[in-house]
Image (cartoon, helix red, strand yellow):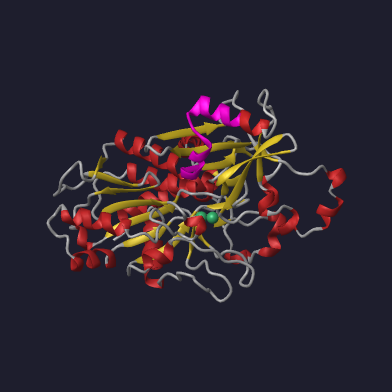
Amino acid sequence: MKTVWETYDAETREKMEAFSKDYRTFLNRAKTEREFVRETIRLAEENGFQEIGRTKGPWKRGERLYAVNRGKNVVLYVIGERPIEEGINILGAHIDSPRMDVKQNPLYEKDGFALLDTHYYGGIKKYQWVARGMALHGVVVKKDGTAVDVVIGEEDDDPVIGVSDILVHLAAKQMQKKAAEAIEGEQLNLLAGSIPAKDEKKDAVRKYLLNLLKEKYGIEEEDFVSAELEAVPAEKARNFGIDNSMIMAYGQDDKICAYTNLRAILDVKTPARTSCVILVDKEEIGSVGATGMESRWFENTVIELLDGYGKADLVTLNRTLSNSRMLSSDVSAGLDPNYAEMFEPKNSAYLGRGICFNKYTGARGKSHANDANAEYLAKIRRVMDEEKIVFQTAEIGKVDEGGGGTIAFILARLNMDVVDAGIPVLNMHSPSEISSKADLYEGYRAYLAFLNRMD
Ligand code: MN
Ligand code: MN
């Protein structure tokens, strides 16, 4: 099977390299869902998108619109030539990633250290998240409603924080434990300080840190209750491999698909069918919450669009959704040569072989799989071939090993055709995920082809 590399000429490789550089820069600015939304709005507005509500319909072909939900969930539309109720071409990805969230009552002092207690977010191998530099990103909302943005650990001179691990010399007992138990959830405590406040008898280190937070950010201990502080890896996105062919970065699940979705819709000009990109929060914890895919917010934005044409009724909404098509853009598990026995080689995703379509992703007997329609896959194949897009198909690991969920089934519930289509990564859900630059660029090309050509 051909790799993307063999199909690219020098000029395309240059474009790929430039695209991957933009991607790395974007990742470094957008490690959290809130930051991803902020950067998305910035790029969207630079590219002529206007917020729905500030602009009134009926909109003309090529008009560009967006809407934001609670700063953590964003949707973009480019109006098509045909009436919206004939269906929308939708790309969807999630912008949340595994991490450690600071608890609501986090701060304590022990043995001369101040620590922040965390509750990890999403599925992680906890042993991968200790003994490394973490940055703290998020927002503290004070009782009067003012929000204080916090980013500690991104500038070169910034301090980082992190969870300690026991030295190997004292780890005999730990090393006998199962990997799942070697680090317990309640051991994920971030070391945050060690200077005692002067003339304090009790909890002097804790008090010093509180004074510092007050001074620097104007926040009190009680303000942690209404804060969202996320500890994420402090490293920057890097080129990877001696041949410079890959990217190593935190949060590529699923920001690699979210970014390529976003770039695709920014480059859509005057589509036949209305184009849409929906970027959601909370996928890693089950797509719940008002900013997750299970929220009705997305449908609400479709109604708002229809309202711009005086057609905000349930019949038109249902017709629109039923006629729509979607690529659920979520990363696929790339075949890892160190663990090849977990994969079935004919039906695995390989780095460098292009965007990957997963007809189903469920575990053990396709449980909870979206299992897309053959007719829909045939249409997609045709578009991909006509646009000379390199693609592959895969499932997640061997039949009785793998499986995983995405947002596909939630949109399929609205009675539209949906299939998972994502970029393969190695090290998924670790602090340093690996992708191929070739798949990154080919993914963008595939998403753009879908928006422009899918009928
Ligand atoms: Mn994902
Ligand atoms: Mn994931």
Where is residue 208? Give x, y as percent: 62, 28
Q: Can residue 279 be seen in this view?
A: yes
Pick out the residue farthest to the bottom. 365
271 with respect to 201 (left or right): left
Between residue 312 and residue 322, name the one nearer to us: 312
Q: Can residue 18 be seen in this view?
A: no
**Vertical position of residue 235 compared to residue 419: above or below:** above
Magenta-colored stretch includes residue 319: no
178 with respect to 238 (left or right): right
User: How many discs mark residues in the rendered view?
Assistant: 0
Where is residue 60? Give x, y as percent: 16, 47
Magenta span: chief secondary structure: helix
| Quadrant of res 193 | top right
Q: Quadrant of the C terminus?
A: bottom left
| Quadrant of res 329 | bottom left
Between residue 83 and residue 183, name the one nearer to us: 183
193 with respect to 62 (left or right): right
Magenta-colored stretch includes residue 212: yes
**Ligand 2 located in image quadrant:** bottom right
Span of residues in magenta? 209-228
Q: Quadrant of the N terminus?
A: bottom right
* Residue shown at 47% from the left, 29% from the top: 218
Where is residue 304? Give x, y as percent: 21, 54
Between residue 28 and residue 342, name the one nearer to us: 28
Where is residue 190? Give x, y as percent: 65, 41
| Quadrant of res 170 | top right
Between residue 133 and residue 88, name the one nearer to us: 133
* Residue shown at 60% from the left, 35% from the top: 235
**Vertical position of residue 324 compared to residue 217: above or below:** below
* Residue shown at 46% from the left, 49% from the top: 257
